[in-house]
């Protein structure tokens, strides 16, 4: 006890309290989900199945400086609305970016495509995304190859922040 009679917190308790506070702030920094509206181009639509129809849709994010694509497998609820989609068509898409604690990174999800609501199964491996930025490789002023980067550059994330992962 100090001279004035006030109790003293143990140093270990202070450290634990500080660490708990820092952890809470870190988790809070992941924040609430963010919603974006963008333009996508329909690259491919395939509907299959007779009783419980499934629809595979491949989208390209039209405003992104890289070749950013989203492949989605959607259930029968989408199939009725989605049968009107045409390859090459450009549509508005609503995308939600949120932190996925289970996987430890951000995940984006298309929740509306044109006039159709979208409900993805996050565990279905048929749903995925690819990002690829390619550029010519030159030697002596001539194109001698192509270099492709699958990372998410600052330029890409500045124009398409919903593609963020960390």
Image (cartoon, rainbow, N blue to C red):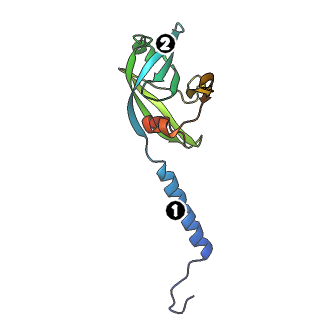
- Please, which residue is most extreme toward the left here? 115
Q: In this picture, is 127 found above or below 16?
A: above
Residue 21 is marked as 1
Circle 2 — which element?
A: strand
Q: Earlier in the sequence, mark 1 or mark 2?
A: 1
- Closest to the observer, 146 or 148: 146
Residue 72 seen in this snapshot: yes
Q: Residues within 10 Å of mark 2 (few under 14, many from 20)?
A: some
Going by the image, does 146 lie left or right of 78?
right
Q: CA distance from mark 1 to mark 2?
A: 48 Å
Residue 77 seen in this snapshot: no
Q: Residue shown at 45%/37% (left/top)?
A: 161
- Please, which residue is most extreme toward the bottom here? 3
**Residue indicated by mark 2:** 45
Q: In this picture, is 21 found above or below 93?
A: below
Q: Residues within 10 Å of mark 1 (few under 14, many from 20)?
A: few
Q: Return the x and y of residue 78 as percentages of the image width and height.
A: 44, 18
Q: Residue shown at 48%/22% (left/top)?
A: 60
Q: Return the x and y of residue 4 as percentages of the image width and height.
A: 50, 91
Nearer the observer: mark 1 or 2; the answer is 2
Going by the image, does 149 lie left or right of 74?
right
User: Do the residues bearing badges 1 and 2 touch, measured as CB atoms within 8 Å?
Assistant: no
Going by the image, does 166 lie left or right of 93?
right
């Amino acid at each position: 006890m100090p001279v004035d009679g006030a109790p003293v917190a143990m140093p270990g308790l202070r450290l634990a309290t500080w660490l708990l506070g820092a952890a809470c702030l870190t988790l809070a920094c992941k924040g609430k989900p963010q919603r974006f509206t963008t333009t996508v181009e329909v690259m491919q639509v395939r509907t299959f199945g007779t009783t419980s129809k499934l629809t595979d849709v491949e989208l390209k994010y039209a405003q992104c400086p890289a070749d950013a694509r989203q492949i989605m497998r959607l259930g029968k609820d989408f199939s009725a609305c989605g049968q009107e989609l045409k390859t090459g068509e450009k549509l508005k898409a609503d995308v939600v970016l949120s932190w996925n604690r289970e996987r430890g990174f951000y995940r984006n999800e298309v929740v509306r495509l044109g006039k159709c609501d979208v409900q993805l199964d996050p565990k279905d491996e048929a749903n995925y995304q690819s990002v690829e930025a390619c550029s010519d490789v030159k030697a002596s002023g001539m194109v001698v190859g192509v270099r492709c980067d699958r990372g998410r550059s600052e330029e890409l994330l500045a124009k398409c922040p919903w593609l963020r992962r960390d």
